[in-house]
Image (cartoon, helix red, strand yellow):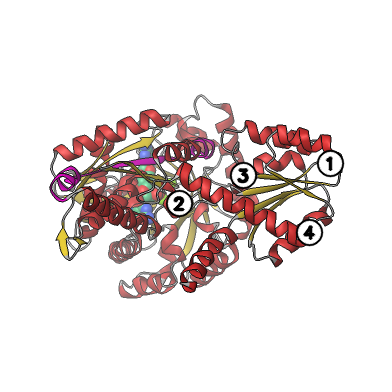
């Protein structure tokens, strides 16, 4: 008996001591003392604010459970802060204990009218402080439970869930994030209620609620707002419907992984009084901002998608918009195809000639990977490289490219094009992989390629991570005899300071500057400056994406060293490259 009582008080204390206590007082010493006293009493989470105009914004970030508020403060006094709180759609129920030195009863009266929950006089008495805070928090916890949570499952009730969702939506708008609302429709609950009794139906829902909490808590995919409990973004909407809000997803496609986990969890047998029951579900999803900008629309659309999903059979999920469904299906398919593409030898390396302006000779080629998809034909690297990066396939793919490029160039070097160089694009993940240096050395050795004929193309953004470490790696690779080229220059940081420090021998001006050279004076000026700058640092300049004579003329005038673009040649298969080089050398000698 005694045990039970102790247990229950212990449990509620566990909940209370995790409460977030916010203190607003213009005197730092006071903040210090009150906090120390409450820490002594066992509380662990505090937010302190010294500058009262910051109270509300801080509150919106930190979600306190209780506020201890000083009255006499410059700028915004306690009355004004209290009024703002009571007018705030989110905090009008927040318990506020007023700390005041003023004995004056009229100020207490004013504070009461403004909605103060309780008072404490300064200087604070430690045991009184602990008692008031604890009582207020217990009362709040009890009221919250009644007002905001569903009796059966302990999850937020519909009204509170909609409030939580509208707050999540506001922060998504502010931070320009997307948000996914999942509507989970259970099958068979009505059936179970009718045939086995409501209490069995209730138990089933409790089990499912617990499983949903576990899925969300265990999910590395779901971001929770600070101060938010993992149960806070799940709600029981009705007897056979649950909802989940997913925010902070790195990508809305990821919601699918959550759907799969949810469906899996619901499908597990549910043991009621020794026998197993099976429940299934369909899930609909709506996405902010694509499918709606307000709570009502998102809820409506998620439900419509859920109903459509249920019509397709059990255990299905659907997005509201057909484009989203098509896109995610296509992405999923591309992901699974890409995983097999290396084994199935579906990649091919193309080469685009680089022409020296002064001589008109082909001095090098850039290798550009292509994916020969068995059904979709040639897929552009701009489509599949980002996916390969996401799936961690870029490292093995990059090694394949490197090896192939070295093999092809070694063959050309041995057959009359001894000075020709090959450029290989390197993704950030590859470069940061500790095996990268060895992979480069191995590819050179395996294919007997002269290191001087290999250039690695890298972008600024991939060098920005661990700056010193990256310079180090570059220098070591440089020592092998391999050169570096900075790709897509002008689109990233374009920091002159970095430019000086990286051991780079070549700089590639991004195609976007050349597109507008005819019409945009600034772009002409930028290109001219980049060329002059690179030359002053002893680097060669390559202009990418040259398509027209007028661009070529301009670049020639500005002493650009090398040109790459459709004007001379598109990227070519290895066989076509050999033909191109033969014609080229015949022209030169003939
Ligand atoms: P990038 O390295 O900047 O490659 C230049 C891109 O510009 C190539 O597109 C090329 O076909 C295109 N291009 C060249 N001249 C012209 C022109 O005159 N006009 C136009 N409109 N485009 C031109 P591609 O082959 O589609 O490759 C796109 C990007 O994919 C590459 O940009 C590179 O970032 C990446 N990529 C390609 N192959 C590899 C690879 O093996 N590894 C890695 N990590 N990335 C690669
Ligand atoms: Mg490149
Ligand atoms: Mg480029």
Report the span colored magenta: 170-196
Instruction: Indicate yes or no: mark 3 CB to ligand 3 under 8 Å.
Output: no
Q: Is residue 320 above or below residue 461?
A: above
Residue 520 in the image, given as x and y percentages of width and height: 54, 26
Q: Which mark is residue 32?
A: 4
Name which of mark 3 and mark 4 comes first in the sequence: 4
Question: Label 4 near label 2: C-beta < 8 Å?
Answer: no
Name which of mark 1 and mark 3 comes first in the sequence: 1
Nearer mark to the viewer, of 1 and 2: 1
Residue at left offset 38%, top offset 34%: 547
Closer to us: 518 or 411: 518
Q: Dot 1 lies on which element? A: loop
**Cα distance in 3D space between marks 1 and 2:** 39 Å
Residue at left offset 18%, top offset 52%: 279
**Cα distance in 3D space between marks 3 and 2:** 47 Å
Tell me the residue that label 3 is attached to: 532
Q: Which mark is residue 375?
A: none
**Cα distance in 3D space between marks 2 and 4:** 32 Å
């Amino acid at each position: 008996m005694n045990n039970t009582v102790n247990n229950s008080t212990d449990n509620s204390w566990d909940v209370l001591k995790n409460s977030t206590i916010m203190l607003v007082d213009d005197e730092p010493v006071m903040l210090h003392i009150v906090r120390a006293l409450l820490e002594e009493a066992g509380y662990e989470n505090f937010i302190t604010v010294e500058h009262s105009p910051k109270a509300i914004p801080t509150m919106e970030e930190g979600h306190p459970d209780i506020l201890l508020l000083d009255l006499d403060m410059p700028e915004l006094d306690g009355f004004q802060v209290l009024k703002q709180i009571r007018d705030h759609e989110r905090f009008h129920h927040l318990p506020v204990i007023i700390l005041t030195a003023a004995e004056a009863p009229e100020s207490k009266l004013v504070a009461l009218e403004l909605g103060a929950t309780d008072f404490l006089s300064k200087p604070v008495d430690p045991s009184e402080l602990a008692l008031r805070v604890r009582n207020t928090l217990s009362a709040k916890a009890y009221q919250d439970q009644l007002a905001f949570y569903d009796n059966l499952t302990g999850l937020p009730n519909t009204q509170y869930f909609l409030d939580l969702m509208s707050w999540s939506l506001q922060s998504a708008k502010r931070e320009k994030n997307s948000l996914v609302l999942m509507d989970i429709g259970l099958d068979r609950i009505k059936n179970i209620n009718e045939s086995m009794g409501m209490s069995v139906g209730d138990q089933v829902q409790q089990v499912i609620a617990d499983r949903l909490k576990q899925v969300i808590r265990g999910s590395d995919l779901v971001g929770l707002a600070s101060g938010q409990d993992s149960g806070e973004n799940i709600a029981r909407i009705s007897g056979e419907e649950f909802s989940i809000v997913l925010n902070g997803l790195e990508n809305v496609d990821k919601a699918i992984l959550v759907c799969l986990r949810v469906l899996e969890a619901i499908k597990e047998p549910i043991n009621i009084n020794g026998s197993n029951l099976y429940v299934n579900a369909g899930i609909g999803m709506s996405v902010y901002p694509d499918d709606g900008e307000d709570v009502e629309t998102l809820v409506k659309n998620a439900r419509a998608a859920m109903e459509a999903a249920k019509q397709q059979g059990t255990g299905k999920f659907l997005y509201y918009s057909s484009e989203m469904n098509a896109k995610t299906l296509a992405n999923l398919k591309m992901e699974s195809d890409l995983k097999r593409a290396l084994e199935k030898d579906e990649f091919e390396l193309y080469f685009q000639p680089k022409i020296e302006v002064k001589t008109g000779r082909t001095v090098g080629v850039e290798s550009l990977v292509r994916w020969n998809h068995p059904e979709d034909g040639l897929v552009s690297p701009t489509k599949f490289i980002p996916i390969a990066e996401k799936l961690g396939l870029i490292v093995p793919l990059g090694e394949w490219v490197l090896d192939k490029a070295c093999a092809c160039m070694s063959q050309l070097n041995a057959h009359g094009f001894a000075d020709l160089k090959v450029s290989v694009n390197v993704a950030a993940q590859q470069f940061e992989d500790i095996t990268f240096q060895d992979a480069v050395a191995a590819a050179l050795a395996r294919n007997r390629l002269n290191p001087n004929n290999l250039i690695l193309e890298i972008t600024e953004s991939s060098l920005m991570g661990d700056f010193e470490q990256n310079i180090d790696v570059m220098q070591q690779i440089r020592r092998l005899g391999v050169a570096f080229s900075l790709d897509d220059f002008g689109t990233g940081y374009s920091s002159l300071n970095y430019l000086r420090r990286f051991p780079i021998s070549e700089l590639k001006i991004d195609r976007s500057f050349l597109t507008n050279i005819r019409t945009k004076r600034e772009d002409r000026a930028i290109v001219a400056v980049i060329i002059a700058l690179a030359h002053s640092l002893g680097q060669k300049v390559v202009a990418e994406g040259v398509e027209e004579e007028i661009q070529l003329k301009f670049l020639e005038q500005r002493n650009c060293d090398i040109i790459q673009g459709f004007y001379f040649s598109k990227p070519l298969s290895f066989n076509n490259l050999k033909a191109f080089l033969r014609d080229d050398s015949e022209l030169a000698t003939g």
